[in-house]
Image: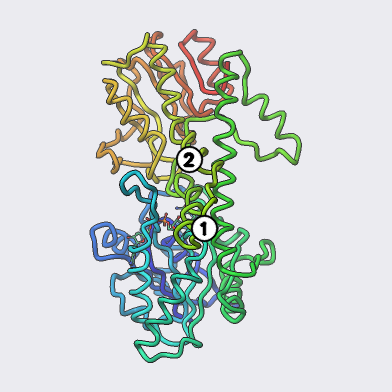
Amino acid sequence: MKNIVIQGLGFVGSAMAVAIASSLDRNGKSLFHVIGVDRKNQLGLERIKSINSGRFPFNTNDDKLTSELKKSIERGNLKATNDTNVYATADIVLVSINCDLVNENGQDKIALSAFINSICEIAKNISENTLVIIESTVPPGTCEKIVYPLFEEMFNKRKLNINKFYLAHSYERVMPGDAYFDSIVNYWRVYAGIDEESADRCEDFLSQIINTTDYPLTRLSNTAASETGKLLENSYRAVNIAFIEEWGRFAEEVGIDLYEVIDAIRMRPTHANIRQPGFGVGGYCLTKDPLFAKISAKDIFQLNGHEFQFSTKAIQVNARMPLVTLNKLKHYFNGTLLGKKILLLGATYRQDVGDTRFSPSEIFVKEAKREGAIISVYDPMIIKWDELNIEIEGQLPDSTGFDAILFAVPHKEFANISFNDWISQKNTLLFDANNVLTKEQISEIKQNNLNYMSIGRG
Ligand SMILES: NC(=O)c1ccc[n+]([C@@H]2O[C@H](COP(=O)([O-])OP(=O)(O)OC[C@H]3O[C@@H](n4cnc5c(N)ncnc54)[C@H](O)[C@@H]3O)[C@@H](O)[C@H]2O)c1
């Protein structure tokens, strides 16, 4: 049985650990022994403890993921630790750590030194014949120009043969949510090796985890291409979302339902993935990845003239989107939010996901509070909003006393709200910022003559 060590037990690494540990051969025997490594800090220790006790470290609705984790812990082929010595036992090391975008003196930078220090922990410990697969989203050129030379240097120091070191990049498309587990196992994957042998070894490993019969792997010519693939995918999506924003505002003002228009356009297969207006874009990836290529061009390839203007603009437009909602609310309340009681429904960056990193709701709450609004929050996916240090109500609060109720995230639970029963005051404004409410709910609101506004509908 091969030993797989995963560095980083976050949203990606934890799910990947379960997916690998649940891979079985034809006789139902585990193919891999998996050890997840996280840091010695509070966050890392909590994630380690959670996995070792058979509990997934993040709130998830995906029963497949939680039950496969339990089975792996019972079988004994998955455990978590903060002991970096375990890298020495690995046949394969998967790197699933964060590589952050940071702002230094007004300049966007990638926190590469933290990333490199983490890679050093692996280079100091692994044995010859180990394959290292980088899954983290990194700037193009990282594997070839930073990671490989680092292993070369360390192998020289340790008197190991660098020709017996294998390196690949294979980016994650994992999607926390209802199909979290399947977004790894039943989904297409891209990979590339630093050389042919590394690519072959990576392919062999991925083929044992992923259902490649239905979801064939794609091999790219080199690791920079694979690193670029991830960034281009996410930049494409971020630009597509930003592009719609001005159309939404136009539709509202001239009395068009842009969702209806977009549904009509989506009938064309060539336009099926056109995005729709909304509250904003959040999460760890779409808020940073579109800036990585620009930084790589300058800092890794020392090239001028690659400004990536579309991607940069998309980041700016998307970050401002929650403020469009805020300004509409302010306008409705005659130019001020001072003393207005607002119930925000949804704090996470995405529906039915327990991840609040860089959520549009965070931008909204910070600004609304600055404007003097009094904000209450309910989100069925979290009990505490760490970034804002807010305890979350355990259930949908009574609607009485709120001047406005803002629907920000289309969590499934919100589709069950009955406005006939829940709304007690006719003057409370119901603001749907993210196409959260169903057609039935909207007609219920209209039948009851309640105050209703939305983003993207005139
Ligand atoms: N979250 C997603 O849906 C998603 C999807 C695709 C790709 N990605 C990419 O995957 C990578 C990981 O993302 P994430 O959301 O899992 O991040 P995360 O912040 O949730 O997890 C990273 C984990 O790595 C740990 N870590 C950092 N340095 C370490 C070290 N030296 N040793 C051991 N553990 C260490 C951190 O403590 C943390 O638990 C990022 O590059 C991200 O851009 C994320």
Instruction: Look at the numbered disc 1 and give the secondary structure of its residue.
Output: loop
Total labels: the figure holds 2
Residue 390 in the image: state x and y as whole percent.
Answer: 26, 36
Query: Residue at (39%, 70%) from the top-left corner?
Result: 74
User: Is there a contact, CB below 8 Å, between mark 1 and mark 2?
Assistant: no
Quarter of the picture containing the C terminus is top right
Q: Percent position (x, y) of residue 231?
A: 54, 53
Q: Which residue is more in the foreground, 423 or 315?
A: 315
Specify whether 440 is left or right of 218. Answer: left
Q: Could you tell me which residue is drawn at 36 percent across and 57 percent down?
A: 111
The residue pinned by badge 1 equals 303
The answer to which image quadrant residue 46 occupies is bottom left
**Is disc 2's CB within 8 Å of ligand 1?**
no
Q: CA distance from mark 1 to mark 2?
A: 22 Å
Disc 2, SS: helix
Residue that badge 2 annotates: 315
Amino acid type at image mark 2: Ile
Label located before the other in sequence (1 or 2): 1
- Residue appearing at x 47%, y 66% in the figure: 142
Q: Residue 363, percent across and down?
A: 37, 33
Position of 232 with respect to 317 (left or right) is right
In-front residue for pair 171/111: 111
